[in-house]
Amino acid sequence: MTQQSAVLLITFLAGLVVAAILLGTARRNVLSRSAMVIAALAIPSWVIYFASNQGRSFLAAKGFLSTMPDALWFGLTFGVFTAAFFLALGYVYGDARRRQMPAWAWVIAASLIPNLIGFILYFLFRGPLLCPCSSCGKPIRGGEAFCSHCGSSQGSSIGRITADSAQKGV
Ligand SMILES: [Zn+2]
């Protein structure tokens, strides 16, 4: 196995794992639908690009193998990696929103700060998960005894709120 194909294989598998984990959270309505659409389009787009003459001459110019199977493999790897990246951005957007954090600011930070450091910062600094107040319905921190908006006691519903937030998870 050449070094080039080893790097591609690792990138491909890493992208698949990240995409699978993020799609696993999709049923919790955290991942935005537009991110899933962009992610799904990314794979055929890159495959078509690298299979085209333009993509193959780009590969050749960069010193990579540019036969058709190599080009398709390149396209698939790039596609899966791009898909995972957009799914991760979609997750940051949905997760920041339910935590009442500036979602677009975090999406921009995560996409612009290189080497995935933006994503790491997000997970380090994200706020606590919010639950609706049992009285007024406004979002409050899970497990708080009193609502910070209306002041009503959350005692009777703490069991339910804790169960809800455990269910919603990550
Ligand atoms: Zn309240």
Image (cartoon, rainbow, N blue to C red):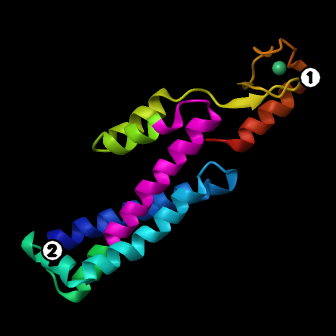
Mark 2 near mark 1, Cβ–Cβ under 8 Å? no
Q: Amino acid at mark 1?
A: Ser
Query: Quadrant of the rendered structure where residue 86 is?
Result: bottom left
Horizontal side of 79 relative to 55 (left or right) equals right
Snapshot quadrant of residue 71: bottom left
Which of pointers 2 and 1 indicates the residue nearer the eye?
A: 2
Q: Mostly what secondary structure, the magenta segment?
A: helix
Q: Quadrant of ligand 1?
A: top right
Provide the residue span drawn in magenta. Answer: 76-104
The kind of secondary structure element at disc 2 is helix
Instruction: Determine the CA span between mark 2 and mark 1.
Output: 63 Å
Please tell me which residue is depicted at 78% across the width and 26% down the height of the picture.
138
Crowd band around label 2 with a 10 angstrom C-alpha radius: few (<14), some (14–19), many (20+): some
Q: Residue at x 83, y 14 (%)?
A: 150
Q: Is 120 above or below relative to 55? A: above
Quarter of the image that includes the N terminus: bottom left
* Residue position marked by numbered label 1 in the rendering: 156
Disc 2 marks which amino acid? Leu
Give the residue drawn at x 47%, y 63%. Answer: 39
Q: Is residue 37 magenta?
A: no
Residue 95, given in percent of the width and then of the height, sits at: 58, 40
x and y percentages locating residue 60 in the rendered image: 10, 77
Inspect the magenta stretch and tell me whether residue 89 lies in it. Answer: yes
**Which residue in the protein does label 2 denote?**
59
Residue at coordinates 53% horizontally, 65% vertically from top-left?
A: 37
Q: Is residue 82 above or below residue 160?
A: below
Q: Residues within 10 Å of mark 1 (few under 14, many from 20)?
A: few
Q: In the image, which disc is placed on residue 18?
A: none
First reached walking from the N terminus: tag 2 or tag 1: 2
Ligand 1 within 8 Å, label 2 CB: no
Name the element at disc 1: helix
In the image: residue 146, left or right of residue 11: right
